[in-house]
Image (spheres, rainbow, N blue to C red):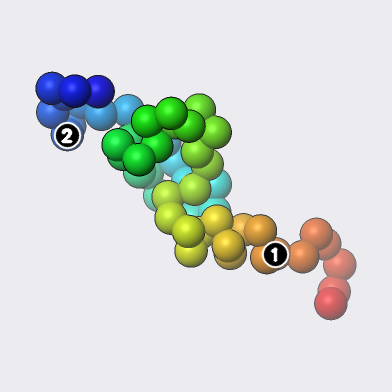
Amino acid sequence: MKGVKKQHLPEKTCAACGRPFTWRKKWERVWAEVKFCSDGCRMRKAGKPSGGKG
C-alpha cells in the first residue's frame, strides 16, 4: 500500500457497528481476516450472548 492516497485505501464495514473503516498499516498481513473497526467493537461482538433471555 506504499504510495497510495488515503481516499484510495481499501474499505470494509465493521461487523459490530456497521460503520465503514479503511485499511491500516498494522493490518497489512491480516487484512483478509479483519472484521471489526476497533478492539471495542470486537469485544462487544464477542461478548454478546447467543440468543434467549439471560
Question: Can residue 22 be spotted in the picture?
Answer: no
Residue for point 30% across, 36% down: 25
Give above or below for 18 relative to 51.
above
Query: Where does residue 20 sit, x and y in percent of width and height?
Result: 37, 44
Label 2 secondary element: helix
Q: In the picture provided, is 17 more to the left or to the right than 8?
A: right
Q: In the picture provided, is 33 more to the left or to the right than 1?
A: right
Q: Nearer the viewer, residue 11 or 42?
A: 42
| Residue under label 2 | 6
Residue for point 19% across, 23% down: 2
> For the residue carrying disc 1, how many other residues have a C-alpha within 10 Å: few (<14), some (14-19), or many (20+)?
few
Query: Where does residue 52 sit, x and y in percent of width and height?
Result: 86, 67
The amino acid type of the residue labelled 2 equals Lys
The amino acid type of the residue labelled 1 equals Lys
Distance, label 1 to label 2, CA atoms, is 33 Å
Quarter occupied by the N terminus: top left
Residue for point 80% across, 59% down: 50
Tell me, for residue 12, which label it has, or none.
Answer: none
> For the residue carrying disc 2, how many other residues have a C-alpha within 10 Å: few (<14), some (14-19), or many (20+)?
few
Give above or below for 17 relative to 26.
below
Residue for point 66% across, 58% down: 46
| Residue under label 1 | 48
Question: Can residue 20 be spotted in the picture?
Answer: yes
Q: Are marks 1 and 2 in contact (CB under 8 Å)?
A: no
Res. 44 image quadrant:
bottom right
Label 1 secondary element: loop
Give above or below for 32 relative to 51.
above
First-in-chain label (1 vs 2): 2
Count of number-bearing discs: 2
Outermost residue on the bottom side: it is 54
Quarter occupied by the C terminus: bottom right
